Image (tube, grey):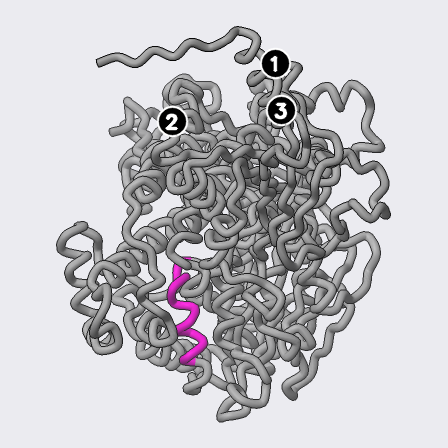
Amino acid sequence: MSHTTNTNPNEQQAVEQDLINHWSNPRFLPRTKIGVIGYTSAGKSCVVNRLLGVSCLTDDDAAPVRTIKSTYYQLQFDRQEPLIYPPNRDIKIPVTFIDIQGLDKDRPTVNDQIEAGNYLDEIRKADCDIYILVFDDQLRYEQEGWINYIELTLGRKCVLVRSKVDICYLKKFRELANIPFGRSTPEQRSQYDQRIIEQIRYDNQVELRQMPFWKKDPSKKELYTNVTEGLRQIYKTKLLPLEEAYRFHEFHSSQLDDSDFAAKPMVLLVGQYSVGKTTFIRYLLNEDFPGIRIGPEPTTDSFIAIMHNENPGVVPGNALVVDPTKPFRPLSKFGNAFLNRFVCSQIRNEILETITFVDTPGILAGEKQRVDRGYEFSQVLEWFADRCDRILLLFDVSSLDISDELKRAIEVLRRNDDKIRIVLNKADSVDQQALMRVYGALMWSLGKVLNTPEVCRVYVGSFWSKALTFDTNRRLFELETKDLFNDLESLPRTATLRKLNDLIKRARLARVHALIISELKEQMPSVFGKDSKRRDLLNNLHLIYEKIEREQNIPMGDFPKLDRMQEILRNMDFTKFRPLDRKILERVDRMLSDDVPKLMGMIPQEEQAYLQLSSQSSGGQMASGNTIFSDQDETPFAIGGVEGINAGIGECEWIVERSRHEYDQTFLQLSPQNGKVTGASAKQEMIRSKLPNNVLGRIWKLSDIDKDGMLDIDEWALSQHLIKLKVDGHELPNVLPDHLIPPSKRHLTKNTNNMNPSYGNSGVYPTLGNTSYSGYN
């Protein structure tokens, strides 16, 4: 059955016109609600004012704007002029903007702030048609969750707006060009413009699980200008989301800032009071630094960071932790009790241009070590140990006892045992026999604390500028000092490799931590028995460890300490933990398998560039200056400066002439033919030195200057001189230096080896392998 209705065309036009008039009346038009979300101080209210068309921030209709948090609850603003829909210029859409309270990303919740877990409720209660996410920094995984919630759960549209790009541009320009933007030339600006824009666009990218239009192009390769920039990018885009999702920072280490990646190598000095920590730094710098206090009593009562600055002075801790250029911002979590005992001593010194030293208070005995300081000393020590490049653990020959407090400090440092170097200071205050007993006692004490099968390396010396009390072991002290200083001098060159190594360790720990937290979440009941199950999981946390180790094939050495995890978990609500997100876990796995090897391949190039830059800045020699590293170089007081292969440099007489009479007698006994001896006749005499054949063959090659396969009387004397040096324990050169070439042969050389007649080069000649003369074996 059908039903037909006849409609008058005039009546139909009248109805349509009536509907148009009705919906054109602003009183009857439904207003489109657009919500603005984001973190506090991201610029949300500024975006609202711009969309409202407000030019003056003092207008009554303007959203409140300040440099700090200004929006404490949702504010609604009706735009006076409706928006015109672009496809049809006749459609006008009235709009209401909702300025939603921002979420504080840096501090825990207080009375006037909403909790992070309830921010999705704030977004839902706003009930907007469109949401605008305003952000002034790299997108976080938490913000990715907001977008997913809006797009997938609420079924609304979310638009991203990057604010404060000008500030980000200026910051990145200074990082790349090393000069402020205002002092740059147009050529420099055009040089970095495109690179900075690409980096900002890269920071804006975010991968979403069910939103393919946000995914990055897989064909687009990630390019890094240097290793440090690459570390920063892969941390913020791949590792940081995992840390934030599973609350890694509350359990282990605080979030890394940009200053952590750009920081200079840091050397941490730890030990009991009056072992010579501050004096050691004074010995290295060869001058006092602001705030220095040296004495037999406990003098250093603060953590002192000694850094380079053209204007000497002391910066207090509270001002230091808010400086974005210094890597100390996370230390604010230890409170004023620590910050009042933390200062930065700034001084103009050449060594500090590449290395930062941190002097620590002497470790005391008894309760005063733990209670009277007012802060957790071991936690602060652990923070510095995680971020420093080298840890110098100093002992005094007069106080080898390892107290319980020092033992706890060493246990905190053991997580970074690859950075620890042990120094036995003030070794000149005892004679040779007593030093042997002291060294043995120290090794015995360390063996009980370190619990490692390997014997640790101990540097023995006296690191101050006063005269030695017992001069018997002077040679030993010089060699030990040289080894220790060579280790410290290598830090600027290997700092990037250390940062990469630390990031790998952090990623492995974060991965295991995420598996532990997600496993606890999975085993928690949804309704009843939560408290009893939580207690059971805490008491049997070791079973969780064993299950993850077995199922994920992860070594137990990657797991965090069991007792520490249990202590922190006691105050946690397991129901708020996140289930395992395979996507971000796979992102970290790809980082370790793909990105890290790429950065590893760039490290040798950067090390070579660093060496070339150091050589150019010092004219081909080691940088000279008023420092303990270089004061003695190029002088007779350099270690090995007038010994071994360097003996005779700068002298008019050939050094071999001093024992020439003995060498000539041996040469004549070999029955030379035409003034020369062959290899066969010289072999029996040379092997009496008991040196290996490869060493004797190398000596023969160095001595046979005219390369005729035989030795004349001068070349024979030179060979005997080199044998004597090797028997005495000195190294042989790769190329014969000029001062050892016999005067009768100097016309044959073209000065290709042209060794610089300076002191302190005993260690610059590489040792050859199995090198022998074909007619000598």
Element assignment for label 2? helix
Q: Of the residues tagged 3 and 1, which is closer to the observer?
A: 1
**In the image, what residue occupies the spot 76% across and 50% down?**
65
Q: Is residue 755 magenta?
A: no
681 left or right of 652? left
Q: Is residue 417 magenta?
A: yes
Pointer 3 local density, CA inside 10 Å: few below 14, some 14–19, many at least 20: some
- Image location of residue 352, percent across then percent down: 69, 54
Residue with the mark numbered 2: 212
Pointer 2 local density, CA inside 10 Å: few below 14, some 14–19, many at least 20: few
Above or below, comparing residue 626 to residue 703 in the picture = below
Choose the circle earlier in sequence order: 2 or 1: 1
Q: Is residue 668 visible?
A: no
- Image location of residue 412, percent across then percent down: 42, 71
76 left or right of 213? right
In contact (CB < 8 Å): disc 3 and disc 1: no
Numbered mark located on residue 195 in the image: 3
**In the image, what residue occupies the spot 42% across and 63% down?**
252
Magenta: predominant secondary structure element? helix
Residue with the mark numbered 1: 88
